[in-house]
Amino acid sequence: MAASASKPPVPPLPLMRGLDGSKNFLQKYSDVKRAINRAGKIPMDPRNVEAGDVLISIAEDGDRLSRREAVLRSDSVGPVLAAHGRYRYSAIGQRPDFNWPQGRRLAVYVGLNLEHFAFGDGLGAELCPGGPHPDVLNYAWRDYGNRVGVWRLIELFDELKLPLSVLANSSIYHYCPEVMEAFRTRGDEIVGHGRTNSERQGVLAPDEERQLIAEATDVIARAEGRPPRGWLGPWISQSQVTPDLLAEAGYEYLLDWCMDDQPVWFSTRNGGRILSVPYPQELNDIPSIVGRKDSGEQFAAMITETFEEMLAQSKRQSLVMGIALHPYLVGQPHRLRPLRRALQTILARRDEIWITTAGGIAAFSRALPDGIVPT
């Protein structure tokens, strides 16, 4: 917060760096307090904060100090919150303006999750509380999505001439290659989505997580002739180093973070960066239908209400609206019909919006001049 008129501003001092590079920037208050006592001053950097703000630079590996910053907005040194250090705060109404292609202001994409699950082991969404493994009820319900639901959705997307970002577990290529062939024929974008949604990547050690990313990427690259440009973690699961590992593996964007309606640059180690493309958790059938027990009609209403509101909001800022779907949920007949109506409502305004993919949004955003996309 800014200093009050009665309180003189804190003079700018050199930025304190590397208080404890081994803690993955989960800096504890006691560490910061001891460091400040040793230095006899509160570290400030006038380039990044106003007088009265406390800026602590926290490194994960000790090799990316310039991009690992945690800001505590306080007039005194109190408890210091752990910070991810990937991006700074940016109010959406205070950013440079830009347009999407053809002067459009609202970009709309559909992310279709294709997921395969282990039988009798691991994670999986539930239609109803399952019993001990093997949980046949919920396993078979999810498998309906790959055997029936996905084909009903392909018919719908063909009917609507709607491009897709297909977020695919790499094990899908082995389990039901016909499904991936159908999306390849349609020309849809393929996005990395781990090996299987029976596991989370965020709980793995860095080397194990690196291997998971490499395995999933290799399967897609061999099948599609090129590696995917984007990634969504199984169960939106990330470790402290996931963005770094993705950038180092050649990925251009990630989809796990839902904190904005515009793309945001994430800083990564060694001075790198990776783009975050908005991915929805509200317009997502898992939190809606599985989590909140919304009906298909309620989920479809959320889609149309969000579209109409964001179309109006986009007069002020260019925005991204994503819709996240799973075949075992919206591929069910009673949910497919209201979904069709919602998508028809959006596509009736096709001439006013940019119907695209997550990869299309990423490619356009990466080409914008520096300073347009927030960091």
Image: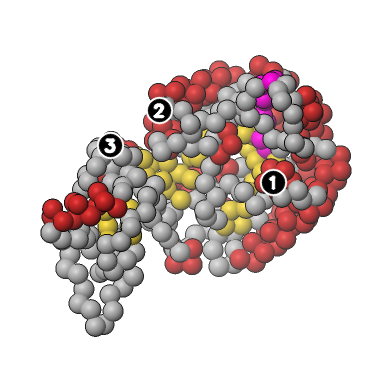
Q: Nearer the viewer, mark 2 or mark 1?
A: 1
Q: Amino acid at mark 3?
A: Ser
Please state the total of marks drawn on the protein image: 3
Where in the figure is residue 349, as x and y percent of width and height? Answer: 73, 57
Q: Which residue is mark 2?
A: 206
Q: Is residue 182 left or right of residue 363?
A: right
Along the line of sight, the residue nearer the viewer: 158 or 237: 237
Badge 2 density bin: few <14, some 14–19, many ≥20, Cα 10 Å: some
The answer to which quarter of the image holds residue 102 is: bottom right
Where in the figure is residue 101, as x and y percent of width and height? Answer: 57, 52
Residue 337 is covered by the magenta coloring: no
Residue drawn at the location 72% of the way across and 61% of the way down: 305
Q: Helix, strand, or loop for circle 3?
A: loop
Q: Which residue is mark 3?
A: 22
Relative vertical location of residue 322 with respect to residue 172 in this rendering, above or below = below
Where in the figure is residue 5, as x and y percent of width and height? Answer: 26, 82
Q: Amino acid at mark 1?
A: Gly
Q: Helix, strand, or loop for circle 1?
A: helix
Along the line of sight, the residue nearer the viewer: 263 or 233: 233
> How far, Cα to Cα, is label 3 from label 2?
14 Å
Relative vertical location of residue 54 with respect to residue 86 in this rendering, above or below = below
> How far, Cα to Cα, is label 2 from label 1?
30 Å
> How far, Cα to Cα, is label 3 from label 1?
37 Å
Q: Amino acid at mark 2?
A: Pro
Q: Which residue is mark 1?
A: 291
The answer to which quarter of the image holds residue 117 is: top right
Badge 3 density bin: few <14, some 14–19, many ≥20, Cα 10 Å: some
